[in-house]
Every structure is written in structure tokens, then in C-alpha cells.
Amino acid sequence: MVKAEKLMLQTFTKEQVAALLEQPDRKTFTGYRDFTMMTVLLETGMRISELCHLKISDIFFREKEIRITRGKGGRARRVPFQQTCAKIIRRYLDIRGDLETDALFVNINDESISTRALQDKMKAYGHAANISGVRVSPHTFRHTMAKFYILNGGDPFTLRRILGHATLGMVDYYVELFSSDIKQQHKKYSPVENMKRII
């Protein structure tokens, strides 16, 4: 049962990610908020519930990390983010302005955005971007983050800590799953192939 479930794991291509990020109208509050949420999901791979429960006080710009206090199984963890993501979050906070709530991502009623609302928005953006063959959801962003992290040279041990997995089991599966992508990367970056003039 578990193996059958794992085989259904899907990820976005770079082109699909780009198309999704282009969908929100960044000139509006909700549009820039949605763009920011997708960026944070792609940067951190956090779960949808973790994203929706984030508070402004969980963001540490100096350390460039998000502190997740309500992780799966009650486990807290620190998740890093980089300069580009930091700029996007700062811009969102400027647009969001000062509110009574400390919730990071809010709806137009100044309430914390619900997981259902985010799922519905993702689905709508996927439809607008004409994405087919892959489920457009926050969890697909999580799997996509894992894929690109591995393909860009990240190690499984660090990825496990970022994603908040209790064991290396799922991370090992990511490595196994994306082995075909790794073959493509090897084809491009093979030391021997790139030394053809010498050999």
C-alpha cells in the first residue's frame, strides 16, 4: 500500500513552476500574497499546515531562517531561506502592513489564510497556467523542492532536516525517484564527457 502511494508522487518541471509563479496578479494584495506563499513553499518545502500557521515572529531575517513551531508530530525546526526569498517576504510584509494579528499570511478579512483556501487557489492557478498531468497543490511544491534540492547537489541529510522528516526513509526515496533526472544531469556534467578534447 505504501509503495503504491509513493509511486504516485509527482513534481513540477521548472517550466511549470515558472508558469505558476506568473499567474498571481502581483499588483494586488492577494496576488502578491499568493506569489509569496508559492515562493516560500518552493524555497523551504514546508507543509501546507506549517505555512498557514506561520507568524511574523517566526521569520528571522538576520539569520535567514523560518522557525516552524508547529511541525508534524509536534517537532519544531529551523528552515533556512536565501536572499531572493527574503526580498519577496519583506515586500509582502510592506504590502500587508500593520495588523492586529501576528499571522503571516492573511485573507482580506485579516484572518489567517486557511489550508482549504490555499489549496483552491493553487488549483485555480494550475488551471490558468494550463498545467496538466500533475496535481497542482502545496504538497507538490514540497516534492518539487526536494527534487531540485537533490538535483542542485544538496545532500539527503540536510534535506531531511529542512523538510522535517523523522527518518531518512522518504529522503532516500526522493533520491531513488529522481535517479532518471540525475542521469540527465550526469550527461551534462560528466567529467569524462567534458574532457573530450583531452581524452
Image: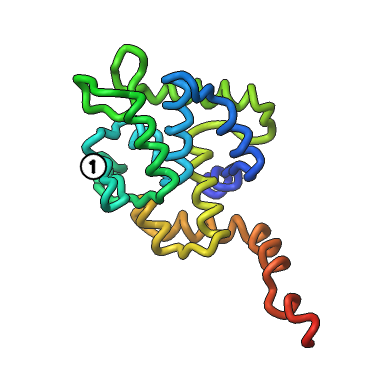
Question: In the visual, does 22 lie left or right of 96?
Answer: right
Residue at image location 27% in from the left, 53% down from the top: 63
Q: Quadrant of residue 60?
A: top left
Extreme residue toward the left, this view? 100
Residue at image location 58% in from the left, 45% down from the top: 4
Question: In the visual, does 47 lie left or right of 17?
Answer: left
Q: Position of residue 79 (x, y in %)?
A: 33, 50
Q: Position of residue 160 (x, y in %)?
A: 39, 57
Residue under label 1, please give it. Answer: 69
Extreme residue toward the bottom, this view? 199
Q: Closest to the observer: 182 or 2?
A: 182
Total marks shown come to 1
Q: Quadrant of the C terminus?
A: bottom right
Q: Is residue 185 above or below residue 82?
A: below
Judging from the image, what secondary structure is the residue with disc 1 in?
Answer: loop
- Using a 10 Å C-alpha cutoff, classify the residue at mark 1 as few (fewer than 14 neighbours), some (14 to 19) or many (20 or more): some
The disc labelled 1 sits on which kind of residue? Answer: Thr
Q: Position of residue 6 (x, y in %)?
A: 55, 47
Extreme residue toward the top, this view? 109
Q: Closest to the observer: 26 or 149?
A: 26
Residue at image location 77% in from the left, 87% down from the top: 198
Q: Closest to the observer: 51 or 91?
A: 91
Q: Position of residue 45 (x, y in %)?
A: 44, 45
Q: Quadrant of residue 182?
A: bottom right
